[in-house]
């Protein structure tokens, strides 16, 4: 069953329950009003009937009333004794059934009451009340034929009204469900179109502020994120192919020269071997950084408590061993954060490697950690003003950096790590020369 059919059925069922409940309440109220009129008439008859209890020759009481027509509007009247017997006028034709409750009323143990009874196929309303004479109660009955006929007509009308209301509700539910589900259908068609065409640029109308508009907006946001991801993947593959092409071409040329059976001077052969080794190292580093970038796009690892100052100290020691020609000065304040230690340490190591690479021999790299921020400042030639906005882009290398080893991915990894931790990175020219790079992460107290 389709969702539209289920929605229509649910609306019809809800209306059916509401109409049935309203019809039942209406019927009960009308029945109560009609029977109330009969009860009022019975009370008036009590005050208007002339009661005369006399003794027969045997000394037994009897009711002296004019004859009545059974089933007539004037009703039936009789006395009830506390022993449960009925006393009627000599002209009476029908005896009302005496109940235990009526007997208790005659005995003075219960008050007056109304009840329904059926005598000889006629539905009656019976009013029982005590009288002045001890041990007796009066019963007056009136037929309910007119009331029952009216209730039967009302019951039929209510059934017709309920059926019409349910049918109308089902029709309106179908119309409303079609209008309400129109955005869902558009969303479904858009999803099917994207699945079929792989066109992530498709968008749907998300005007409005209701839940369906929010769903459409979320769908558009998801498509935009997928489009950006696909574009980034294509760009990464394109850039990686371009960056790998040059070292692969050079490596192939050098290997072909070495593979020829041509006598080369020892110095040239050694130079070619060194070039091959360096090119292999560059390709290995490039592939490692590509893998690091790809891992960064995967689901994040569960963060934990991290001391940013301690992680930075470890990264400084490792970089100092790898870059013995550069000195490092550190000012590290205790800085607790939440994050993934391995990726944070990799980002800081990339900042330190970049600063060491641009520092002159014997130069100094200044490192500061404070309030969730790592600042690395070198005293190298600095970065040109026009290159500053792009230094964290993948594979971007300034003109002066293209002659130096590197893949152009180190600072891109830094930005990726920063964004994954809710932070940011920036680069600026330092006063007095060199470059200052800042890695900002959100500080958070360590859990006790």
Image (cartoon, rainbow, N blue to C red):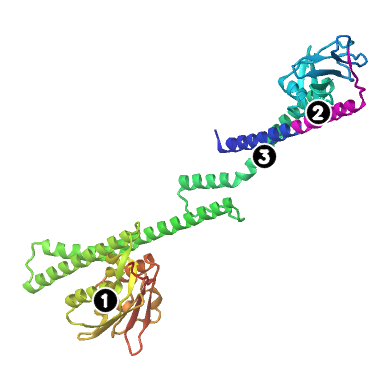
Gap in angstroms between the C-alphas marked 1 and 3: 66 Å
- Provide residue 137's location: percent of width, then percent of height: 80, 22
- Determine if the magenta segment contains residue 53: yes
Is disc 1 placed on a helix, strand or loop? helix
What label sits on residue 352 in the rendered view? 1
Image coordinates of residue 442 in percent, x first then y, are 38, 71
Which of the 4 quarters of the picture holds residue 238?
Answer: bottom left
Mark earlier in primary sequence (1, 3): 3
Extreme residue in the bottom direction: 432
Can residue 383 be seen here? The reply is: yes
N-terminal of the pair, mark 2 or mark 3, is 2
Is residue 80 rendered to the left or right of residue 415? right
Whole-angstrom CA distance, mark 1 to mark 2, is 97 Å
Element under label 3?
helix
Q: Nearer the viewer, residue 385 or 370?
A: 370
Q: Provide residue 142's location: percent of width, then percent of height.
A: 84, 21
Q: Where's residue 301, x and y in %?
A: 32, 59
Residue 409 shows in the view = no
Give me the disc on residue 175.
3
Point out the stretch of residues depicted in magenta: 27-55
Q: Provide the residue designation for mark 2.
A: 35
| Left or right placement of residue 264 versus residue 391 in this view | left
Left of 343 or right of it: where is 137? right
Query: Relative to 159, does residue 404 appear above or below in the rendering?
Result: below
The mark that comes first in sequence, 1 or 2, is 2
- From the image, give the main secondary structure of the stretch colored magenta: helix
């Amino acid at each position: 069953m389709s969702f539209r059919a289920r929605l229509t059925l649910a609306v019809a069922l809800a209306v059916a329950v509401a109409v049935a409940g309203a019809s039942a309440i209406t019927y009960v109220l009308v029945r109560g009003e009609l029977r109330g009129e009969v009860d009022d008439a019975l009370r008036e008859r009590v005050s208007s009937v002339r009661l005369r209890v006399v003794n027969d020759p045997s000394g037994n009481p009897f009711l002296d009333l004019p004859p009545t027509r059974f089933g007539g509007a004037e009703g039936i009247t009789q006395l009830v004794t506390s022993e449960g017997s009925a006393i009627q006028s000599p002209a009476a034709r029908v005896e009302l059934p005496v109940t235990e409750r009526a007997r208790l009323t005659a005995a003075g143990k219960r008050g007056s009451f109304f009840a329904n009874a059926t005598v000889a196929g006629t539905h009656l309303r019976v009013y029982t009340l005590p009288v002045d004479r001890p041990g007796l109660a009066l019963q007056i009955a009136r037929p309910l034929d007119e009331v029952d006929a009216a209730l039967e007509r009302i019951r039929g009308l209510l059934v017709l009204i309920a059926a019409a209301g349910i049918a109308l509700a089902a029709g309106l539910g179908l119309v409303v469900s079609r209008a309400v589900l129109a955005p869902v259908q558009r969303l479904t068609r858009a999803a099917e179109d994207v699945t079929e065409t792989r066109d992530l640029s498709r968008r749907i109308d998300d005007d409005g502020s209701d839940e369906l508009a929010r769903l459409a907006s979320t769908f558009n946001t998801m498509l935009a994120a997928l489009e950006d991801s696909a574009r980034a993947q294509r760009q990464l593959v394109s850039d990686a192919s371009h960056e790998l092409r040059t070292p692969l071409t050079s490596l192939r040329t050098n290997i072909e020269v070495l593979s020829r059976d041509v006598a080369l001077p020892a110095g040239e052969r050694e130079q070619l071997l060194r070039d091959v080794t360096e090119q292999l190292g560059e390709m290995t580093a490039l592939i490692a950084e590509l893998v690091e970038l790809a891992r960064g796009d995967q689901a994040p690892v569960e963060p934990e408590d991290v001391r940013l100052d301690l992680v930075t100290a470890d990264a400084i020691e490792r970089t100092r061993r790898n870059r013995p020609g550069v000195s490092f000065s550190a000012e590290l304040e205790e800085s607790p954060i939440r994050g993934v230690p391995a990726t944070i340490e990799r980002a800081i190591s990339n900042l330190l490697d970049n600063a060491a690479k641009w520092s002159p021999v014997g130069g100094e790299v200044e490192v500061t950690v404070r309030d969730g921020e790592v600042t690395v400042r070198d005293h190298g030639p600095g970065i040109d003003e026009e290159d500053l906005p792009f230094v964290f882009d993948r594979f971007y290398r300034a003109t002066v950096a293209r002659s130096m080893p590197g893949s152009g991915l180190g600072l891109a990894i830094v930005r990726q790590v920063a964004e994954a931790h809710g932070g940011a990175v920036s680069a600026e020219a330092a006063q007095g020369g060199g470059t200052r790079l800042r890695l900002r992460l959100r500080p958070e107290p360590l859990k006790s």
